[in-house]
Image: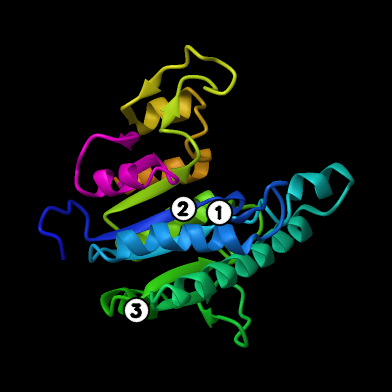
Amino acid sequence: MNKNLVYKRILLKISGEALAGPEGFGIDPVKAEDLAEHLQAVYDLGIEIAVVIGAGNLWRGRQGLDRGMDRATADYMGMLGTVMNAMALMDALERQGVITRVQSAIEMRAVAEPYIRRRAIRHLEKKRLVIFGAGTGNPYFSTDTAAALRAMEIDADILIKATKVDGVYDSDPAKNPDAVLFSNLSYIDAINRRLEVMDTTALSLCMDNKLPILVVNMWDHDALIKGLLGEKVGTLVSE
C-alpha cells in the first residue's frame, strides 16, 4: 500500500448514469470499461474498495409513481436495476484483472452472493473489490442511504460520492456561472441548505456516526487519486 494514502478502506457511491450511453439510458459497455479503468487505478494503490451503484440509467421510480404505481413496487424495481448495473461493472472490472464480488441485499444466489457483513469485510481484507447491489433490501430507502449504511457496516474510513462536477456548489453550476464551490461543509449546513449532497437520511446517518463524505468528480481521474492522498479536492462534508 502507498504510504501516503490517508484512507485504507473506502465506499464509493456511483450513480447509475455513470454506465449510461449517449442517450443517458441503458448500460453502455464502453462506459462500464471506462469506469472500471478508473476504479482499477484506485485499486492498484492498495486501497480496499466497496461500491454502491444506483439504477437511474435503467429505472426512475418517479416515472412509475407519477402514473400511480405503488411506491414499494417502484423501489423494488430500482433495487433490481442496481444488481444489473453491479453485474455489468463486475464484468468490466474482472476483464481489467480486478477480482470482484457482487453482494445483493435481495437474495438471488444464481447471480450474486447474499449480503453478509462479515463476508464482505473478509473479501475486502483479501483485496477483492465488493459491489453492493439492491440497496438496503427495503423500499423507501435510496441508494444514498444504502451507501451510508454499508460504509458504516464495513467500517469504511470515508464515503466518496462520485459526481459529474468538481464538488458541492451553492447552486447549479450548469445554470449559474457564478456558482460557488464549497471546499468544506458541516453535515448540518449540507442538510439545512438542502444542497443535495446526499438525501437527508443518508446525511443524518453519516452525521450520527461521524463518517466523512468526500464529493468529487469521478471523471477527473487525478481528483479522486489526490483526494485519497489527502490533497484538497472536491468538497469534504464532516463535523
Residue lying at the far left in this picture: please name it.
3
Tell me if residue 52 comes above or below residue 221 in the rendering.
below
* Whole-number angstrom distance, CA of label 2 to CA of label 3: 18 Å
Tell me if residue 131 comes above or below residue 204 in the rendering.
below
Q: Residue at x 38, y 74 (%)?
A: 98
Along the viewing direction, whichever of 72 and 236 lies nearer the viewer: 236
Can you tell which mark lies on residue 214?
A: none
Image-based side of 221 in relation to 23, left or right: left
Along the viewing direction, whichever of 179 and 92 lies nearer the viewer: 92
Bounds of the magenta segment: 211-239
Image-based side of 59 in relation to 191, left or right: right
Image-based side of 114 in relation to 43, left or right: right
Q: Position of residue 43 (x, y in %)?
A: 31, 65
- Say if mark 2 contacts mark 1, CB within 8 Å: yes
Q: Position of residue 94 (x, y in %)?
A: 45, 77
Along the viewing direction, whichever of 229 and 10 lies nearer the viewer: 229
* Closer to viewer: mark 2 or mark 1: 2
SS under mark 2:
strand
Look at label 1 and name its amino acid. Answer: Thr
Residue annotated with mark 2:
13
**Is residue 58 covered in magenta?**
no
Residue annotated with mark 1:
143
Residue annotated with mark 3:
123
* Whole-number angstrom distance, CA of label 1 to CA of label 3: 21 Å
Q: Residue at x 77, y 52 (%)?
A: 71
Q: Earlier in the sequence, mark 1 or mark 3?
A: 3
Q: Answer with the quarter of the image where residue 121 lies.
A: bottom left
Residue neighbourhood size for the residue with mark 3, other residues' Cα within 10 Å, grouped as few (<14), some (14–19), many (≥20) = some
Q: Answer with the quarter of the image where residue 136 lies.
A: bottom right
Residue neighbourhood size for the residue with mark 2, other residues' Cα within 10 Å, grouped as few (<14), some (14–19), many (≥20) = many
Q: Position of residue 76 (x, y in %)?
A: 71, 63
Q: Residue at x 23, y 62 (%)?
A: 45
